[in-house]
Image (cartoon, rainbow, N blue to C red):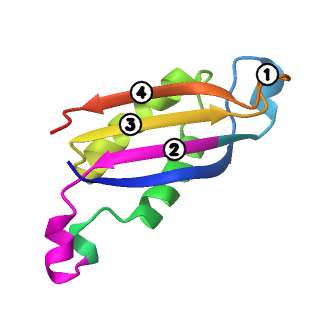
Amino acid sequence: MDKVFIQGLSIQTTIGFFAWEKEIKQTLVIDLEMGWDTSIAAKNDELAKTLDYADISQQIDTFANDNPVDLLETLAERMAAFLMTTYAIPWLKLRINKPTAVHNAVSVGVEIERGVKA
C-alpha cells in the first residue's frame, strides 16, 4: 500500500481536562500517514485522484478547533473517523503530540491506527 503523509503539522487549538486549559489555545503537532493507491493519480498526473495534503491539513486544523475535547484520545478517534469518512481513506496512522504537556519531556501524545492496511 502506498502512503500519503503529513508530518509535523502544528496547530493551535483548545484541548485539555483542566479549567485553565479550556481558556487557552495550545500547540498540537500532528503526524498522519494515509494508505492510498498513488498510481491512479500518477498515471495521468491528476490531483483530483490523490489525497490533497494541503486540503487535509486545513481540515485537521478546522476539525480540531470546531470540536474541542478534553482528551487527545478523544480527538484522535474523532479526527480519524472524520478523515476516513471525508476522504474515503482505507487506513491511517494518526499521531497527536502535545509538546508542552509535560515539563521534562520533548512531547507526549497518542498514536492510533484505524482501517485496513492492504
In the shown orientation, is residue 60 left or right of residue 48?
right
**Residue highlighted by disc 2:** 31
Badge 1 or badge 2: first in the primary sequence: 2
In the shown orientation, is residue 10 left or right of residue 57?
right
Badges 4 and 3: C-beta atoms under 8 Å apart? Answer: yes
Amino acid residing under circle 2 = Asp
Badge 2 or badge 4: first in the primary sequence: 2
Picture coordinates of residue 48, whole percent (x, y): 24, 73
Residue drawn at the location 22% of the way across and 49% of the way down: 88
Element carrying mark 4: strand
Badges 1 and 2: C-beta atoms under 8 Å apart? Answer: no
Residue drawn at the location 69% of the way across and 24% of the way down: 16
Amino acid residing under circle 1 = Val
Picture coordinates of residue 38, whole percent (x, y): 22, 63
| Image position of 63 with respect to 43: above or below | above
Residue drawn at the location 16% of the way across and 66% of the way down: 39
Crowding at dot 4, Cα within 10 Å, few <14 / some 14-19 / many 20+, comes out as some
Which residue is the extreme one toward the top?
18
Mark 1 and mark 2: span between their CA atoms? 19 Å
**Residue highlighted by disc 4:** 112
Residue drawn at the location 77% of the way across and 17% of the way down: 18
Residue 87 drawn in magenta = no
Badge 3 or badge 1: first in the primary sequence: 3
Q: Nearer the viewer, residue 89 or 38?
A: 38
Mark 2 and mark 4: span between their CA atoms? 11 Å
Question: What range is drawn magenta here?
Answer: 29-46
Element carrying mark 1: loop
Badge 4 or badge 1: first in the primary sequence: 1
Q: Which mark is residue 87?
A: none
**Residue highlighted by disc 1:** 102
**Residue highlighted by disc 3:** 93
